[in-house]
């Protein structure tokens, strides 16, 4: 049969070649595509020499699509419990081999952009408005069933929570609907955590999670607890608005290694920074403080002895660094 006029199917080499010829992506696009923060990517480049951007014909720095694919595998490895320090300091051939194994044994994490989201934000808001907390819990549970807990939190709940907050601010959601959303998400995440907490053999650090007085939002804490649990940390959650003296007392009573605090944009900087400063003074020097959330206080001058975690995915870095530097059993 004459096949001279029949297009041949793409070979693997053709697909790789087209991928290599694609335009470089700016770091903001890589952040959106992978969920890895720009600060994290730059810190990794300085510390481990990976990922290293390239320059296009105009001399503009960017990341090739193949490197973005590799970063997605790195992220999957971190959520599966791999330590950044061990992973990213490997020789390139060894890193490729480890990531190939990750690709085979762990479910893929969808890119934030492009591609379908883990949770359809508009669909979630419709479910909330039409059926209340019960309908939203059902919808969220179905979303969780389609992906792993780590991806559900980082790529699903985190952006959905931002969208719900924006909808409340511009009047598309009532105050009570925002509260129903918070209750539904808490119920689904706590239920999802139960199997991990029941059979998990924990390692250091031992982490206390709470908020300072005046900070009533708890979803950030619960999302952080989910990712810390996936890292096999022992987590003790006190809920919101714990007096600073009680935080210090709980640290002593439960031999806590890290105090993790969440700060929402609604907490004024004038309250957040003094609370962080006072708590740092109340705690022993060897007890770490990690602070995360959307508060402007975390983007300004830093409080000495406080580690700011800009994005949820950076929790894996923080845990790995503690285990390397502080844990007596770290290898």
Image (spheres, grey):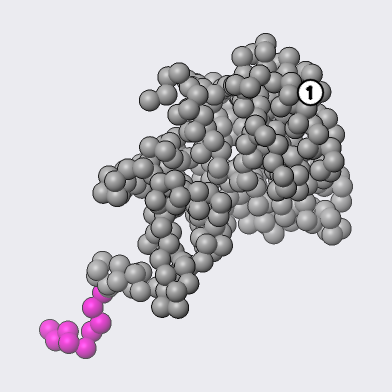
Residue 158 spot, x, y in % from top left? 65, 47
Residue 75 placement, left or right of 205:
left
Residue at 51% x, 39% y is: 317
x and y percentages locating residue 175 in the rendered image: 87, 47
Q: Quadrant of residue 301?
A: top right
- Position of the N terminus, as image quadrant, is bottom left
Crowd around label 1: few <14 · some 14–19 · many ≥20 (10 Å): some
185 or 58: which is nearer to us? 58
Q: Main secondary structure of the magenta part?
A: loop
Under tag 1, what secondary structure? helix
Horizontally, residue 220 falls left or right of residue 243, namely left
Q: Would residue 138 appear left or right of 65 to someone viewing this image?
A: right
Would residue 217 appear left or right of 32 to someone viewing this image? right
Q: Is residue 154 visible?
A: yes
Residue 3 forms part of the magenta stretch: yes
User: In the displayed structure, would residue 28 be above or below residue 257?
Assistant: below
**Which stretch did the figure color magenta?**
1-9
Residue at 54% across, 24% down: 205
């Amino acid at each position: 049969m004459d096949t001279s006029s029949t297009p041949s199917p793409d070979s693997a080499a053709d697909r790789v070649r087209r991928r290599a010829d694609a335009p470089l992506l700016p770091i903001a696009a890589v952040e959106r595509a992978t969920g890895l923060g720009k600060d994290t990517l730059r810190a990794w480049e300085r510390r481990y020499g990976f990922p290293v951007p390239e320059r296009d014909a105009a001399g503009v720095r960017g990341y090739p699509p193949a490197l973005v694919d590799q970063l997605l595998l790195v992220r999957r490895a971190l959520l599966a419990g791999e330590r950044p320090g061990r992973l990213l300091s490997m020789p390139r051939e060894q890193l490729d081999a480890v990531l190939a194994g990750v690709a085979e044994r762990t479910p893929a994490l969808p890119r934030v952009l492009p591609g379908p989201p883990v949770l359809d934000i508009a669909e979630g808001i419709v479910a909330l408005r039409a059926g209340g907390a019960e309908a939203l819990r059902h919808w969220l549970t179905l979303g969780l069933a389609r992906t792993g807990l780590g991806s559900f939190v980082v790529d699903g709940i985190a952006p959905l929570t931002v969208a719900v907050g924006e909808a409340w601010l511009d009047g598309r959601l009532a105050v009570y609907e925002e509260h129903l959303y918070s209750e539904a998400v808490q119920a689904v995440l706590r239920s999802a955590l139960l199997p991990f907490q029941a059979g998990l053999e924990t390692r250091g650090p031992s982490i206390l999670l709470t908020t300072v007085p005046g900070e009533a939002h708890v979803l950030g804490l619960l999302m952080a607890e989910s990712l810390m649990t996936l890292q096999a940390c022992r987590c003790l959650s006190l809920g919101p608005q714990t007096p600073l003296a009680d935080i210090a007392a709980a640290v002593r009573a439960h031999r806590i290694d890290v105090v993790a605090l969440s700060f929402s944009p609604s907490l004024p900087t004038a309250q957040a920074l003094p609370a962080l400063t006072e708590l740092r003074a109340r705690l022993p020097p060897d007890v770490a403080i990690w602070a995360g959330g959307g508060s402007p206080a975390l983007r300004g001058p830093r409080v000495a002895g406080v580690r700011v975690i800009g994005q949820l995915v950076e929790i894996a870095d923080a845990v790995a660094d503690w285990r390397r530097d502080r844990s007596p059993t770290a290898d």
